[in-house]
Structure formats: structure tokens, C-alpha cells
Image (cartoon, rainbow, N blue to C red):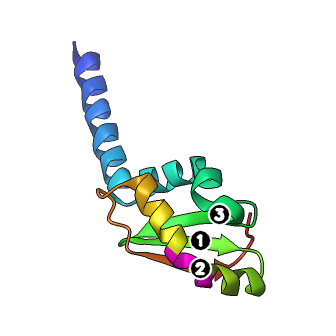
Amino acid sequence: MRERRQLEKVGDLIDAVLGKVARRGVAPVVRLRQHWPQVAGEWADRSRPVAIERGVVTVEVASGMDATMLRYDAAGLLESVQAELGDEVGITKISVRVGRGR
């Protein structure tokens, strides 16, 4: 009997932790990564979403040239991201940074 109660408590703890992680943007960024080829279109091979924080999706590209070009296309990408994630995530901006890219 005691072991069962301990397992239930561990299960509650895991649910609580996963709930907090999901609220911080982990679940939406995972979903976005899974659908990135459809969402990003021509940018899918040259970029990747790395974070979602406070309504901002951070997208990483491999070069400064790609970063500049994607910043010009950010409005279109923002619309695609909003359509994929819906209103519950509240995406308002795309931030582009140079890093590893895809």
C-alpha cells in the first residue's frame, strides 16, 4: 500500500513538472520543429526554430546573409508560425540569429 502511494506522488510530481515545462514554450517549439518544413517553406533547409519565449520565436540560420534575408521575410514566416501554433501560444515576433542554422 505504501509503495502505491509513493508512485502516485511521483506521478503527480512528474505531471506538475511537465506542465511547467510545456508552459515555458517547450511543447510549442517541439511542435514547430516537427512541422518546420511546411511552416518555413523555402527557409526550412537554411533555418531552424530554437526557442519560443514571451511570444517571440527565435530562428537560427547559418550565415549573416541568410539572417538579413530572413529578417526581410519575417512577416510571412510569422503568419505561417501563427497559423501552425494557433492563438494559445501568442506568437507576436520572429527573432533571427546567426548560429548553426539547419
**Does dot 2 land on a helix, a strand or a loop?**
strand
Q: Name the residue under label 2.
A: 96
Residue 89: percent from left, percent from top: 34, 60
Given residues 70 and 9, the one toward you in this image is 70
Q: Magenta stretch mostly in which secondary structure?
A: helix
Residue 68: percent from left, percent from top: 68, 87
Does the CB distance between marks 3 and 1 fall below 8 Å? yes
Given residues 1 and 55, the one toward you in this image is 55
Q: How far apart are marks 3 and 1 (CA)?
A: 6 Å
Position above or below: 70 against 83:
below
Q: What residue type is labelled 2?
A: Val
Does the CB distance between marks 1 and 2 fall below 8 Å? yes
Residue drawn 59% across and 79% down? Answer: 96
Residue 54: percent from left, percent from top: 35, 73
Magenta residues? 71-75
Q: Name the residue under label 1.
A: 59
Picture quarter with the N terminus: top left
